[in-house]
Amino acid sequence: MRNFLFIALISLLSFSCGSDEEKATPPDDIIQREQMTQVLTDIQIAEAIYQRGNFPKDDYDGKKYILKMYQKIFEKYGVDEQKFKQSLTWYEEHPKILADMYDEVLNELSQREANLRDKRKSKNKEKKKDN
C-alpha cells in the first residue's frame, strides 16, 4: 500500500494539468473530494507514525501495524481498499484536483502540528508555574 501511494504521488507530478480539469467532479462510485482529502490526511499521519517507528512494538511489527491502520482508516470513512484505489486512480487522472487536495492535506497537517505545539507550550508553562 505504501508503494502504491508513492507511485500515485510520482504519477501526480508527471501528468500535465488540463484547463477543464478543475470543473471535473468525481463519479458517484468514487470517494468525493472532501472525504478523500480526509482519508489522505489520516493516511499521511499513519505513514508518519510507521516511518518514525512510533507504533506499539510489543503487539505489531511495522507491516502489520500499517495494514491495521489503513483498515481502520477505511472503516472510519466507510470505504474499502478497492474503492480507495479506484478513487485514487480517478484523482491521478485529474492531477490538478489531486494536487489541490494534497495542498489541503498539508494545510490540515500543519494546522494540527501547530495546535499540538500550542498545547505543549501551555503544559510546559503550567509545569513551570507549579514548580
Image (spheres, grey):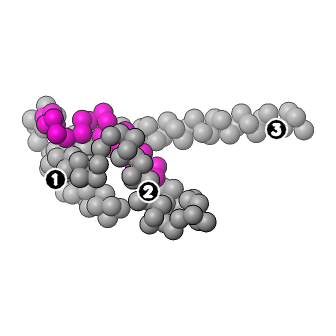
Callout 1 crowding tier (Cα within 10 Å): few <14, some 14–19, many ≥20: few
Residue at image x 42%, y 38%?
Answer: 107
Q: Which residue is mark 1?
A: 15
Q: In the rendered structure, which amino acid carries the disc numbered 3?
A: Lys
Does the stretch in magenta take in 34? yes
Residue 14 visible? The answer is yes
Residue 129: give x, y in percent of width and height. 85, 33
Q: Which residue is mark 3?
A: 127
Residue at image x 24%, y 39%?
Answer: 31
Does the stretch in magenta take in 54? no
Residue 15: give x, y in percent of width and height. 16, 53
Q: Which residues are magenta?
A: 24-47
Residue at image x 26%, y 36%?
Answer: 33
**Relative to the observer, which residue lies in front, 86 or 112?**
86
Please tell me whether mark 1 sits on a helix, a strand or a loop.
loop
Q: In the rendered structure, which amino acid carries the disc numbered 2?
A: Lys
Residue 92 visible? The answer is no
Q: Is residue 22 left or right of residue 4?
A: left
Which quarter shows the C terminus? top right
